[in-house]
Amino acid sequence: MANTITHFTHPEHQLLLISKPKNFWCDLCKTFGTGLRYRCDECDFDLHESCTTYPETLSFFAHPWHSLELTDHSASTNDPSICCDLCCEPLKGFYYKCIPCGFNLHPSCSLSPKIVRTRFHPDHFLTLVPTTGSCSACNKNLTVWTYRCGMCSVNLHYNCLFSSSGKEDDEGIEASRKTQKPAMVSRK
């Protein structure tokens, strides 16, 4: 782990690795963090240590047709309704975008595994696929991308599987997002 880095999101100055108990706002993912971060004091610019590992371009199994480019939401659009095509949550900060198709993806969603096993459905693996219907955990309508057991017709929302406030949590996932990485990326 380097004490200073140059990062493409802030090429003007080097970023220094620091650890402070005070909360900070990550300028890449636009979420709060605490502890270790890369910081430019001159510009009041902070990055989670893990956010520095996202590559500028990415190949992703759910969109194999084109590479995705890491794009700054504030520089590319003022439309607050643009959402991640995987989890359907609004995009803010940097996100991956397919320039030809308009497919959008949170950097953290780029670490989603293609196949998982969960306590909610321990008999079989679930595969991330585009589908419709209702979620087997919350009974709400499904968005486009869903974890599905084709043998049993079990469908889980992305968020029901991964959200700590949903029906499932990370402890129930055998194939974790930390071990199923798309090209060159590590999970926060």
Image (tube, rainbow, N blue to C red):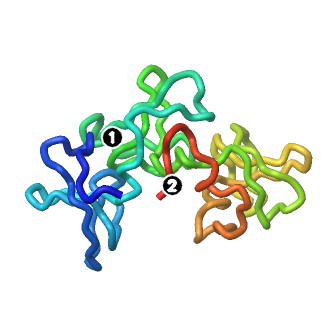
Residue placed furthest toward the left: 42
Q: Is residue 36 left or right of residue 160?
A: left
Callout 2 secondary element? loop
Measured as percent of width and height from the top left, residue 69 is found at: 40, 32
* Res. 138 visible in picture: no
Name the amino acid, label 2. Answer: Arg
Please state which of residues 169 and 138 is positioned toward the viewer in this rendering: 169
Callout 1 secondary element? loop
At 53% from the left and 37% from the top, the residue drawn is 183
Separation of residues labelled 2 and 1 (CA atoms): 27 Å
Please state which of residues 116 and 106 is positioned toward the viewer in this rendering: 116
Q: Which residue is mark 2?
A: 187
In the rendered image, which quarter is residue 62 located in? top right
At 67% from the left and 60% from the top, the residue drawn is 161
Label 2 crowd (10 A; few <14 / some 14-19 / many >=20):
many
Residue placed furthest toward the bottom: 21
Q: Are marks 2 and 1 in contact (CB under 8 Å)?
A: no
In the rendered image, which quarter is residue 124 located in? bottom right
Q: Is residue 114 left or right of residue 3?
A: right
Question: Is residue 31 placed above or below 76 in the rendered structure?
Answer: below
Name the amino acid, label 1. Answer: Asp
Measured as percent of width and height from the top left, residue 63 is found at: 58, 30
In the rendered image, which quarter is residue 178 located in? bottom right
Can you tell which mark lies on residue 79?
1
At 33% from the left and 68% from the top, the residue drawn is 36
* Res. 67 visible in picture: yes
